[in-house]
Amino acid sequence: MIPLSVPVLKGNEKKYLDDAITSGWVSTAGSYVTRFEREMADYLKVPNTAAVQSGTAALHLAMLLSGIKRDEEVIVPTLTFIAAVNPVTYLGAHPIFMDCDHTLNMDLEKLERFLKTECTKTQEGLLNRSTGRIIKAVVIVHVFGSMADMETLLSLCKEYRLKLIEDATEALGTKYTEGSLKGRFAGTIGDFGAYSFNGNKIITTGGGGMITARNEAELKKAVYLSAQAKDDPFHYIHHEVGYNYRMTNIQAALGVGQLECLEEYIEKKRKNYGYYKSLLKDRDDVSLLSFCEKARNNHWFYSLLLNNHKSGRDELMTRLRESGIETRPIWKLIHTQTMYKDCQAYYIEKAPFYQSNVINLPCSVNLKEADMNFIVKTLNEG
């Protein structure tokens, strides 16, 4: 089987894990947690970061610190993994679903139209006239590692006084190479950013995540809340409801080793994407979706668009699986999921097409040219 996306552990991971185990610091305290936070901050060129248990935990804390309250609203994409949306409901708030554009990221033209035509600025905040609720924030996802249009989004969020939360769980290492945000990394541009180190991400800690914040005080608050909000840990005094969200030292030791390999992995993924592209360049029935042209993208996942392929999506995936090739469809659109089907969805028109006509091809860092040759050959046989 050629897997879709598996971790590569080839650096100092075992050395650092052995050191953490030998030290006895294996839980949520230990030198590797602070080291991972510091080295990630250095990589991202931000003052600091906070290491947590998952990307979902990072998103939950970001929304909490954005001041989102019960019965307020948050604008989210429908084409994304559901973890970008579920934390909205943890807070008793309501998602408003936006369509995607041809990049698979949120359609910002529709977002702007929605803000201009469906909402009213009030002293309390931006009022959604159809629901009577205040809209507090936008969650933008850099889908499959491709940079969203943050320049436009920053302008819209400033104009309408909305918090901007970046779901960069798939986009670690993606950064602008031109424009007003040149040099800025995905996840460091909005009010908050969230990263994931799940097993299928470009680097992994097994599980785990990271949060960034524009405001240093809010980042410190994230650390405080992630460790059960201990005001006096000796006497067990807590002034707020906290969460068991802190990353463990074992996870962080793995992360330190993985981070040392990140740039190498990005370059390998970019090279493999280019090789796939060269193999498919003469096809008109399938094509690889492009990444943001203004950014050095991490090329986390490769999206194959079925233009006029004679096999349907599911039929093609079945045939690939029978040949030992693992693929994946895009997520079921969130506004169609049982628990969200009654939420507001604004002119969802493009996302159903992409959801039905895109599959993800194998993209592991250790993918070989021979693997890609075989995958494309199998596609050709269809």
Image: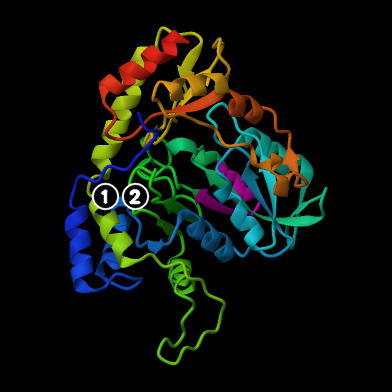
Disc 2 and disc 1 in contact, CB within 8 angstroms: yes
Q: Residues within 10 Å of mark 2 (few under 14, many from 20)?
A: many
What separation in Å lies between label 2 and label 1 (alpha carbons)? 7 Å
Residue reaching furthest front? 322
Residue 353 seen anywhere in this rendered image of the structure: yes
Q: In the image, is residue 34 above or below residue 256?
A: below
Q: Amino acid at mark 2?
A: Thr
User: In the drawing, does residue 7 fall left or right of residue 101?
Assistant: left
Q: Residue at x 52, y 29 (%)?
A: 103
Q: Amino acid at mark 1?
A: Gln
Is 334 magenta? The answer is no
User: In the drawing, does residue 149 fall left or right of residue 338?
Assistant: left
The residue indicated by pointer 2 is 204
The residue indicated by pointer 1 is 258
Give the total of numbered labels.
2
Q: Position of residue 117 (x, y in %)?
A: 77, 40
